[in-house]
Amino acid sequence: MALGTDDVDVIPEVERGLGNTYIIDNKTYVSRDEVYDGYKCADRGMILPFVSEYTWPIEVRAFLYLVGLLYCFLGVAIIADIFMGAIEKITSKTRKVYLTSEKEDEPEVIEVRIWSDAVANLTLMALGSSAPEILLAIIEVIANKFEAGALGPGTIVGSAAFNLFVISAVCVLSIPNGESRRIKDIKVFAVTAVFSIVAYVWLLIILKAVSPNEVEVWEAAVTFLMFPLLVLLAWLAEKNFCGVPNKTDTSKQIELGNFQPGSSNPDKFLRDRQYFRDGRLDRDGLVAFIKEVKNYPGLTDEDAAILAASKLVESQSHSRMWYRVGAVRNMTGGRKTQPQLSTKLKVRSKDRMKTLIMLEDGTNQVYNAMNEHPDAPTLGEVPQVKPHQNAVIDFHAASCAVMEDIGKFKVALCRSGRLDNRVSVRVETIDGTATEEQDYMPINEVITFEPEESEKFVEVEIINDNQWEPDEEFFLKISLLMSAEEREGVQLGRISIMEITILNDDEPGIVMFQKRGFLVKESIGNAVIPVVRKNGADGEITVKWRSIDKTAVSGKDYTGGEGVLTFKHTEIEQNIEIPIIDDMTPEKDEHFEIELFEPTGGAKIGQINRTAVTITNDDDFNNVLNNMMQMTNANIHAMQVHHETYVSQIKDALNVNGGDIENATAGDYVLHFLTFGWKIIFALVPPPSLLGGWLCFIISLVCIGLLTAIIGDLASIFGCLVNLDDAITAITFVALGTSLPDTFASRAAAVQEKYADNAIGNVTGSNSVNVFLGLGLPWFIASVYHYAKGTKFKVAAGTLGFSVGLFSGLCIITIALLMARRVFSVFGKTELGGPTGPKICSGIFMIMLWFIYVLVSAFQTTGYFDF
């Protein structure tokens, strides 16, 4: 058996044997120094190592201990998630409050939490977020036989520094440009801020001034008793037992008052509209929400239920614990605390937004009407004919009419007068109301008559466009050629211009409603009213329509107006879509009319030029609403922080993203794989639904304690292997590992909340609780133990005192900066966000304070200067 040198002093009748051996009761014991001689850090650890790895290379041991340390941080985060669920169950107990309502026999009932926010934040929730640091300090004291260690106190001070400097900086910088967040309960924040300074100044006093390098019983007792004093003063500040009354909180009035539905913006309606009272699902709120959802086509009832659950989650008041649970689950690939829209719903929302932006920008293409065709040009007087001298060329007739579908036909040119010569003339077309290449093919050619030839033909082609048009005309013109030689011996006759009329053979038809009346349900969404085209379908036609209010009123019962229907060639039916407004209230049948007028393209209005649309009350409304209530409740239940049964707890542990595979990312799969072992182990912890959450609370706390003991060993051995003092390991690796979930939680709270309380308001309170519980409790236990034995509880003031003093000074600077940001307009009079320049400067400054704290503390610990 191995013994330490300290053990020899307390064991009676010990005889020293050969070398480093001892004889007790005739049994030989080997000294621990003899066993571990030459193996670095072999004497560290209360629980570890589980295997004898002292002979392994130091580099391998250091790497394995670092990996183990990081992996245990994930384990602590997961069990802390379950621990938080138990706290949520405990603090979510409510009592009913009855309020007057418009209905005399049905008072309005709201549920109010029994636990005060300030009390919950500073007791159970602070314990939940700071349990690893607090338990580490307690376990270290007990493991060291009630002697002070460096890891626990260093972690508490280092974690406080990271929380105040880094988390505050992250929250300040994370607010989107142009936005700001102020602390609402400034009185509670003032109490916790003062106590966060007093706590560390008090540590400095007892370590340096009152009883240097020693903690007496009364000092530890005062440190511990400051915790209930802090809770009491914070509760009094919250209840405003002293000071100026708080201004009216209009946001609470909105939550408890009547709802006034109005128009919404598609990218803001889920965030800004108040649908659900006090974050609870009720019939009136769901009716108002369904009305809004109906304005966005393409959303199914399942999608609407997810959106309703999302709005419910957003409208509820969330604690810092809720955000911390969400941050841990994001880090471990677990079930999210906020609803996730499916890919299909995201695509539909994006398409809807694009459409709305186009409408807002007025991107409507309007085509101008065709210009009128010019009349035929004036050609002057009819020329005099001299048949005995010249050949006379003219048309056979002055005009002709052809059908549009004739295709090609021939027009005769006649020669009279002189026949013994060879003559040529030009024939060309001239537009009238008919247009070349649209109604006919243009002609521009030379026609030559040989001697004794008296007749020639010109081929004319008519274009059949299937578009109804009135009869149109164009002209054929005979003209002499330009050369004087070619003009000799020929002249034009009296009919040198021929009018050709194109007779339309297309039948555009008549347009009218299919029926004189239509019956639609109020919940139909859009009423589809067909308009038919009969007795012809040639060409493109249009017809205008307009709605006419009767007992149904546009804007209240339906969305009316005017529009134009366009029928393409051969199309015989088009639909008018009229959005029907479902007001979700029982009422009599109502109706309105739609009228057709002003047809174009040659079409005519038929006999049924008006139709009546009757809106009937929807008998299925209650079924639809009940179905929506059930689906919304199911989605809300899936997003609860805590589990009600072992089945749901184990299911979440086994499946990535809590079973929501559709919305799981590659990162979720990786994190789920890495933490799968921890999830399975901790799924065996009793769910918070048992015994009001207290059973889960106690067992989770025990699990956190066991993991914290392992973390303490891992950190201590790792620091030893890489030649880091426990104090430096505590303020760096351990402090960062335990505070990382709080960082993500505070950032989420800063971005999503209206106020800064859940982001940075709880940081000061948590830092105070860490001292009062994390140091006050173990020091009180250890000081009482030493007092009973007649010894003194020694706490070296050197490194710890310097670290506490440095943090206290930097803490005052940081809190002063936050208050300056609240007061001065250059910062936007807000703790978080505000103008971009001052916001960035503030964040960088606070991060620099953390680096100063870590570096200066490390230099002092390594002996660069004394304090």
Image (cartoon, rainbow, N blue to C red):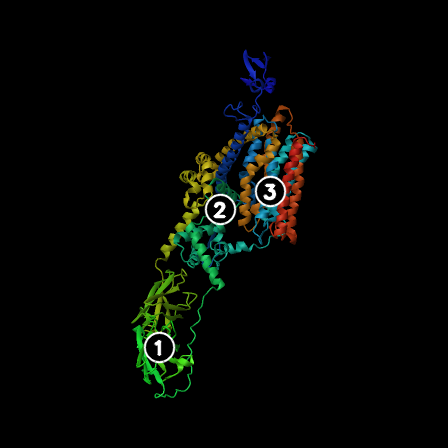
481 shown above or below 351? below
Q: Nearer the viewer, residue 560 or 698?
A: 560
Q: Is residue 285 visible?
A: no
Disc 2 to disc 3, C-alpha distance: 35 Å
Under circle 1, the secondary element is strand
Can the viewer see residue 630?
A: yes
Q: Amino acid at mark 1?
A: Ile
**Which comes sooner in the sequence, label 3 or label 1?**
3
Location of residue 242 with respect to 850 vertically, above or below: below
Return the x and y of residue 260 as percentages of the image width and height: 48, 60
Among the 4 quarters of the image, the one containing residue 846: top right
Q: How packed is label 1: few (under 14 Cα within 10 Å), some, or many (20 or more)? A: some
Looking at this view, is 605 or 583 the one in front? 605
Which amino acid, mark 2? Thr
Check contact, mark 2 vs mark 1: CB within 8 A. no
497 shown above or below 760: below
SS at mark 2 in the image: strand
Nearest the viewer among 403 and 522 is: 403
Q: Which mark is residue 447?
A: 1
Q: What amino acid is labelled 3 in the image?
A: Val
- Provide the residue designation for mark 2: 94
Q: Tell which tag, 2 or 3, sits nearer the viewer.
A: 3
> 10 Å neighbourhood of mark 3: few (<14), some, or many (≥20)?
many
Residue, disc 3: 166
Instruction: Give the quadrant of the C terminus.
Output: top right
Which residue is painted at 56% across and 44% down in the image? 118
Q: Earlier in the sequence, mark 2 or mark 3?
A: 2
Place residue 711 in its image quadrant.
Answer: top right
Which sits earlier in the primary sequence, circle 2 or circle 1? 2
